[in-house]
Image (cartoon, rainbow, N blue to C red):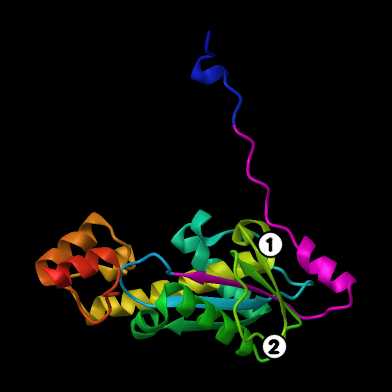
Amino acid sequence: MPCPPSARAAAPPAPAATFDRESAAFARGLRVVAGVDEAGRGPLAGPVVAAAVVLDPRRIPEGLADSKALTAARREELFAAIVATSTVAFVAASTERIERLNIRGATLWAMSRAVAGLGVRAELALVDGRDAPPGLACAAEPVIGGDASVLSIAAASIVAKVARDRIMSRLGTRFPGYGFERHMGYGTPEHLAALTALGPCVCHRRFFAPVAALLAA
């Protein structure tokens, strides 16, 4: 017979992100390794933001993890610690660029620009996901699930998320009524209701299905 809930073994915790990939690159003679990630591919409004982070092996902030697994307050704390100890750059791809290049193309564009904007020349970019951004001046290694397994990518995920959330909060003030400062542009019931009542604004991604449906009505 099935075990009662209290008798079932708890699922093992997910492995913590490590510095193993960066250390392996150092062992090959590389010295500047950047983690790269994005925030904001899925929302109906606002930019997609990519970040690149080169961690200092001697001063890695404690508690780095996939930004989605952290509270907003903890992300802010870690953002400050990352900026204080690491080399950081982030780039926002506007709604117009998303519409021109599509979301994948805009994301890869922003990633490439973030790496280029570091101020130091990366020798390797560890990139969350399946794709390596085109035009990089260094080698790249895509890492599926890298934001949860590679410390440099986890740091980049935090920087990208905090930077984008701040942008969306400002857009919430500029375009009141949509609630951007709360849902960050994602397709929540609040956001969909505001879209129906107010119609899309210039921040909205016109080719994303819920927005396109309203424009076509």
Establish if 189 lies above or below 117: above
Query: Residue shown at 49%/57% (left/top)?
Result: 68
Which numbered disc, 1 or 2, marks the residue that appears first in the sequence? 2
Residue sitting nearer the eye, 191 or 111: 111
Q: Please state the total of marks drawn on the protein image.
A: 2
Establish if 145 lies above or below 40: above
The residue at which mark 1 appears reads as 150
Residue sitting nearer the eye, 72 or 45: 45
Q: Is residue 33 magenta?
A: yes
Q: Looking at the rendering, in which quadrant would you find the C terminus?
A: bottom left
Residue 112 in view, yes or no: yes
Disc 2 secondary structure class: loop
Query: Residue shown at 63%/41% (left/top)?
Result: 13
Marking on residue 137: 2
Residue 61 in view, yes or no: no
Kindly report the distance in space between the C-alpha atoms of the residues bearing marks 1 and 2: 21 Å
Residue sitting nearer the eye, 188 or 98: 98
Image: magenta residue range: 11-39
